[in-house]
Amino acid sequence: MRQLDRRCGPLLPANRAAIEALELVKLETLAEELLDFSGAADLLRWLDLQG
């Protein structure tokens, strides 16, 4: 979460809850993908694709 906050800015509670609900495999994928994020829009796009 700290890495996401640093890359994307403070997370909205709904986004934080969505991330906390992810399965371990998805969290591991997110940990890699966030290295390519340039901001919150990238995170939101990624979360939408996980839907």
Image: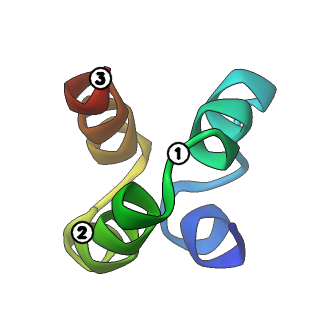
Q: Earlier in the sequence, mark 2 or mark 1?
A: 1
Residue at horizontal 63%, vertical 39%? 21
Q: Amino acid at mark 3?
A: Asp
Residue at horizontal 19%, vertical 72%? 36
Question: Pointer 2: what residue?
Answer: 33
Distance between the alpha carbons at the discs numbered 2 and 3? 14 Å
Closer-to-camera residue (1/25) = 25
Distance between the alpha carbons at the discs numbered 2 and 1? 14 Å
SS under mark 1 = loop
Residue 27, relative to residue 2: is it above or below?
above
Q: Amino acid at mark 1?
A: Leu
Q: Which mark is residue 22?
A: 1
Which quadrant would the C terminus be assigned to in this image?
top left
Residue 40, relative to residue 34: is it above or below?
above
Distance between the alpha carbons at the discs numbered 3 and 1? 12 Å
Q: Amino acid at mark 2?
A: Glu
The quadrant in which residue 17 appears is top right
Q: Earlier in the sequence, mark 3 or mark 1?
A: 1
Q: Residues within 10 Å of mark 2 (few under 14, many from 20)?
A: few
- Residue 48 at x, y percent in the picture: 29, 23
Question: Pointer 3: what residue?
Answer: 48
SS under mark 3 = helix
Q: Nearer the viewer, mark 3 or mark 1?
A: 1
Q: Residues within 10 Å of mark 1 (few under 14, many from 20)?
A: some
Residue 43, relative to residue 41: is it above or below?
below
Q: Earlier in the sequence, mark 2 or mark 3?
A: 2
- Residue 13 at x, y percent in the picture: 80, 29
